[in-house]
Image (cartoon, helix red, strand yellow):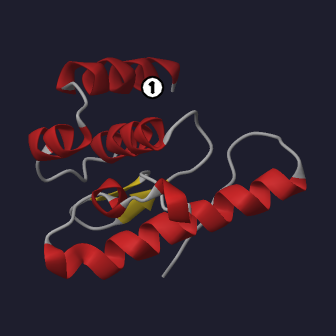
Amino acid sequence: MVCTVSVGIFPIWKDQRYRMLSAEKAYRLYRNLPLGHITSGQSADDKFCRYDGAIKTKRYILSFSGLSSGKADSTLMVCLAKLIDDLEDVSELSKVLDINEETVDFYVDKCRLAA
């Protein structure tokens, strides 16, 4: 099952593009799970518009497109996974994505305060 959600207000062409990119990231990660991939960044290739932005959690593949970089998209998904308590190992994802766990915790706390 695939569920897509638009976040924000933007032109329809951007909505279509971001949905397409997000779906491609998720599907590519799904295809590469047997190889041990936990992020779409592990198979990213800018020449073919294959970007980072999807992560594997305990129960889901979370994917996003539309921020300034694939790394930012992935970081947002790590924060979401942490908020819904669906991460197996944030340290492993942090290493693969080259993000700081304290940064993730900072944004998760900000989201909790805003809710």
- List x then y, in percent, for residue 81: 32, 47
Asked if residue 91 is positioned above or below residue 109 in the image, the reply reads: below
Task: Label 1: state its secondary structure.
Answer: helix
Q: Residue furthest front?
A: 47
| Residue located 29% across and 20% down the image | 103
Q: Which of 17 and 109 is in front in this view?
A: 17
- List x then y, in percent, for residue 84: 33, 47
| Residue located 19% across and 27% down the image | 101
Q: Nearer the viewer, residue 48 or 25?
A: 48
Q: Mark 1 highlights which residue?
A: 111
Q: Count up the numbered dots.
A: 1
- List x then y, in percent, for residue 50: 49, 62
Q: Is residue 34 shown left or right of residue 99?
A: left
Q: Is residue 35 shown left or right of residue 55?
A: left
- List x then y, in percent, for residue 32: 27, 76
Is disc 1 surrounded by few (<14), some (14 to 19) or many (20+) residues within 10 Å? few
| Residue located 21% across and 63% down the image | 58
Q: Which amino acid does label 1 sit on?
A: Cys
Quarter of the image for residue 110 reads: top left
| Residue located 29% across and 27% down the image | 104
